[in-house]
Image (cartoon, grey):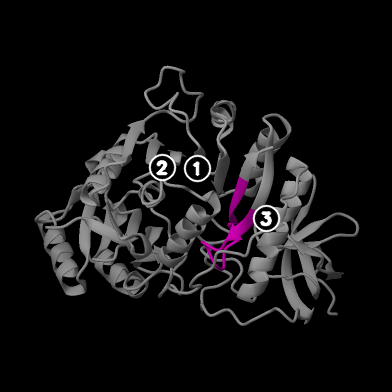
Amino acid sequence: MSAAAPGAPAEELALVTGLTHEGEGVVRGGKTVFVPGALPGEHIRLRRRRRHAQHDDGELLEVLTPSAQRVAPRCAHFGVCGGCVLQHLDPAAQLAAKESELRETLERVARVAPERWLEPVTGPVWSYRRRARLGAKFVYRKNRVVVGFRERAAPFVADLAGCEVLASPARELIGPLTALLTGLTIREQVPQIEVAVADNATALVLRVLAEPAAADLAQLEQFAQAHRVRLYLQPAGLDSVRALGAQPSEPLRYALPGFGLVLEFAPTDFIQVNGPVNERLVTRATGLLELTPAARVLDLYCGLGNFTLALARSAASVVGVEGEPQLVERARGNAARNQLANVEFHQADLAAAPPAQAAWMGRGYSHVVLDPPRTGARALLATVARLEPERLLYISCHPGSLARDLMALVHEHGFALEAAGVVDMFAHTAHVESLALLRRA
């Protein structure tokens, strides 16, 4: 080992024993250090770069003994771009790591284990991401705009030439977008691009901090025609989003073919990012709930009806509740277009316990679905318990909040955890999506 420069942190040889929730290698023995790019079982050479109270941040200098599960990252920007952190780990091993994290979190936080573990819900791991938020920044020293996700270790926009996880045609548009934005008079006033790849079109929403000049509008319209995309401008909040040029003749949409459904959505609406995984997740959900023709289902955090409408194919009635008024309206429209008369939607603040007189309360539900944001559904747990559903399906995008809520449902409200498993919605990232099935104990 070469000698370190005077005053430089010393180099260390170490064994990696695990992964953090952010996908970094964990080195223990003495003060714990987290090392991006290192994998469990590897012997590495590292240098500590930043000190914290409980751990240090390290830099991977060399992999001395690589893991058998290490693979060559497909993307040339891996390691700099923060969009992916696990491309160097075999996809099957990524799933195993996420299952391990879910299992450990449930045991440690919720003090519970499911009666059975479900097979992971999987799908494509490349060119899958149909929703994304890209940063844009004019960089003076490069004399051009850079477009990409945020860098992994710095608050900058990664300078991407392409993206292996974005769905086509968005993945091929990063270079053209860089050229387009560089040529605008407002090139320093476009900080963000929302991407939505629908079954019938691709939409790009440009956040603009200044009104585009006439020459800018002409370039934007030419770009939209050349690349067959829909461009939208967002000068302020979400209610300010407007289509560039004439309003598109048909809304964005995606299908759930197994349920005979087509759902429409706006370019900034939330939809699950991986289309094939989403359909398999909806299929898994309906199977786990074991709905009968007499089932009465409550779908909380229903969004634009992704689960609600599919469940309505098998149940007597389904009630969806959502906090965002525009999504409620979109869900009602989707129900009407799919000719589902046994479903209704209500708007409610789900961050607080609902009042007993709420229109959707007191219906006598046999099944409940929870699909909350990362913060979980803590405010609704007591309400759900009072409904006494036969089966409760919790779909989670954060193992920590899931475990916290399962602890309350199992140890305070009399539910049993029947099954749990991971959903590979975000391949090559450290994001862990999962689902848990509960029944009355």
**Residue at 49% across, 29% down:** 351
Residue 235 or residue 230, whichever sits in front: 230
Point out which mark residue 369 bears. 1
Residue numbers of the magenta segment: 420-437
**Residue 184 visible (yes or no):** no
Residue at horizontal 52%, vertical 66%? 81
Q: Nearer the viewer, mark 1 or mark 3?
A: 1
Place residue 37 in its image quadrant: bottom right
Residue 304 location (% of width, % of height)? 34, 46
- State the residue in front, 36 or 108: 108
Nearest-to-viewer mark from 2 and 3:
2
Mark 2 near mark 3, Cβ–Cβ under 8 Å?
no
Residue 283 in picture, x, y percent from top left:
46, 59
- C-alpha span from label 1 to label 3: 26 Å
**Which residue is label 3 attached to?**
21
Residue 422 within the segment the image draws in magenta: yes
Q: Secondary structure at mark 1?
A: strand
Q: Is residue 108 visible?
A: yes
Q: Label 2 belongs to which residue?
A: 302
